[in-house]
Image (cartoon, rainbow, N blue to C red):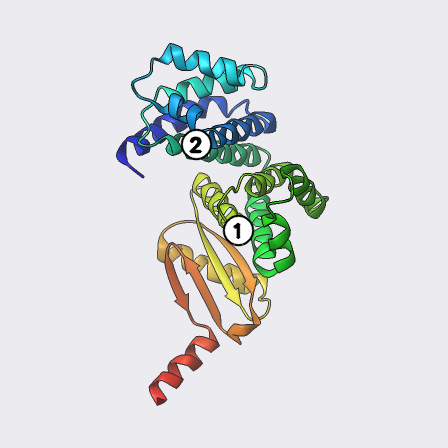
Amino acid sequence: MASATRASLAKAQSALKPLLAKADIKFAEELFGIGAILASSAQLRGILSDPSAEGNAKAEVIKSVFGKTASKPSLEFLNALVVLRWSKASDLVAAVETLAVHTVASIADKAKKLDALESTLFAFQQAIDTDSDLQFALADKNASADAKAKLVDVLLKGKSTPEATLLVRRAVVGANKRRVSAVLASFAKQVSAYAERLVAVVTVASPISSKQLARLERSLAKSYGQSLKLNVEIDESILGGVRIQIAGDVIDGSLSNRLNAAKLQLA
């Protein structure tokens, strides 16, 4: 991320903060919708990210394009974003998406559903990674966005919070050329950043007890000096032990890794 975009994103997050007290799902949906329209039009995002264009001219463009579909708070917030300096036009699109995710995280936090949000994002990501039929259905270029959104709703019905359903749906319909699982992972990382904690993916060959998980969480939190969210995945191929991915580190204590190391020593 270039310095101009980094500075503008920080200013945008500060501008968003007072809006979060009254923000609801509709506001977050509007931000995602604005981001989708910007992503679909190179001309529009070029105009709105052009540092040489006057703020009043940009405001007229925003009113013309979004005036009938977005609320006053969304329009005012977008006006605040486009007067900031973005290194690339695509950075404005990425910023709108990031701020929409941040809004959803705030809504979930107020409803005490932040843990549920993180867990659902991880679970759906795992489902995609392990189900080739689901991967195909979500990546099918012939399927409409509405059809994919309805599939998400069916899969999550009765199993998800409104906040999590929104993020999963947006990850699916707004993936564009990105892999859906990669978008979900990015959303999960942003939600964890909002919660100011690290996420560790713990891979085990079979389920472990809540006591073992709590002990592992305390140990990792102490080592990294930060609170943690543990996401557990089952992978019988590691045979035993545990593999941990956290903050760019991989701690591989799996039995399969130890056996491979032993084979290399004997070779």
Q: If the image is split into quadrants, where does the N terminus sit?
A: top left
Looking at the image, tell me whether mark 1 or mark 2 is earlier in sequence order: 2
Marks 1 and 2: CB-CB under 8 Å?
no
Q: Dividing the picture into quarters, in which one does residue 206 lie?
A: bottom right
- Residue under the point 40% across and 19% down: 80
Distance Cα–Cα, label 1 vs label 2: 19 Å
- Residue under the point 62% across and 38% down: 145
Q: Position of residue 44 (x, y in %)?
A: 44, 24
Q: Position of residue 57 (x, y in %)?
A: 39, 11
Asked whether, in this view, residue 58 is left or right of residue 233, the answer is left
Foreground residue, 235 or 225? 235
| Vertical order, 157 against 32 (above or below) | below
Label 2 crowd bin: few (<14), some (14–19), many (20+), radius 10 Å: many
Checking the image for residue 181, the label placed there is 1
- Residue under the point 56% across and 17% down: 71
Foreground residue, 262 or 225? 262
- Across the whole image, how many numbered discs are drawn on residues? 2
Foreground residue, 29 or 57? 57
Foreground residue, 39 or 234? 39
Considering the numbered disc 2 on the image, is that residue within a helix, a strand or a loop? helix
| Vertical order, 146 against 211 (above or below) | above
Checking the image for residue 93, the label placed there is 2
| Vertical order, 142 against 22 (above or below) | below
Q: Position of residue 148 (x, y in %)?
A: 65, 43
Q: In the current view of this chain or complex, which residue is farthest to the bottom?
A: 266
| Vertical order, 144 against 4 (above or below) | below
Kind of residue indicated by mark 1: Ser
- Residue under the point 40% across and 22% down: 48
Asked whether, in this view, residue 101 is left or right of residue 165, the answer is left
Considering the numbered disc 1 on the image, is that residue within a helix, a strand or a loop? helix
Label 1 crowd bin: few (<14), some (14–19), many (20+), radius 10 Å: many
Q: If the image is split into quadrants, where does the C terminus sit?
A: bottom left
